[in-house]
Image (cartoon, rainbow, N blue to C red):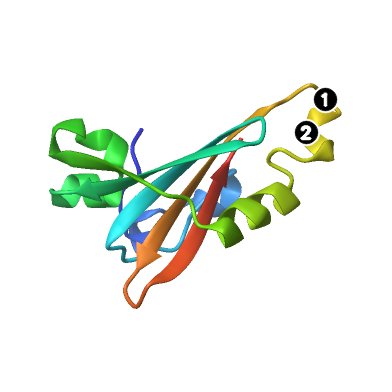
Amino acid sequence: MYTREVDLDALGGVELTAHLFQERVTKQYGVRLIVIGDTCHSVKIKAHSETARTDWRSDYDALEYEPIETPTDIINGVRGYGSTGPHLRRHGLHRAAERSVDAPGGKPFLLTER
């Protein structure tokens, strides 16, 4: 199931079950950061359809990828957050994927998955 906008008034009974809603963040593009050990790789993901702008997984044909350099402050922040830090390594994990979006005005917004 892909991310989509919902009408909260039409979701009768939603309070009776587990659910997850997230704020819609208007973005210029997404960034995927892959961390393997101590190495960081970043790629800019530009969506060229409304469907892909809502959830990039829903329209791969509308995506454009561009490798980009990972800024030092992002590398340090991700390492400090634990993606490659001692908390994950203690459990034998050496890989993490971080997603962020570049909102208008250049303000990054971090979305995390593990």
**For this rendering, which residue is in front, 42 or 50?**
42
Query: Residue 19: x and y, percent?
Result: 54, 46
The image's mark for residue 91 is 1
**For this rendering, which residue is in front, 31 or 13?**
31
Q: Residues within 10 Å of mark 2 (few under 14, many from 20)?
A: some
**For this rendering, which residue is in front, 88 or 112?**
88
The image's mark for residue 83 is none
Furthest residue in direction top, as rendered: 92
Query: Residue 78: x and y, percent?
Result: 64, 50
| Residue 15 placement: quadrant | bottom right
The amino acid pointed to by label 2 is: Leu
**Residue 80, above or below 108:** above
| Residue 100 placement: quadrant | bottom left
Furthest residue in direction bottom, as rendered: 105
Quadrant holding the C terminus: top right
Residue denoted by label 2: 88
**Residue 107, above or below 7:** below
Q: Tell me if label 1 and label 2 are in contact, CB under 8 Å.
A: yes
| Residue 40 placement: quadrant | top right
Query: Residue 54: x and y, percent?
Result: 28, 51
Query: Residue 51: x and y, percent?
Result: 19, 46
Q: Secondary structure at mark 2?
A: helix
Relative side of 45 to 34, left or right: left
**For this rendering, which residue is in front, 49 or 100?**
100
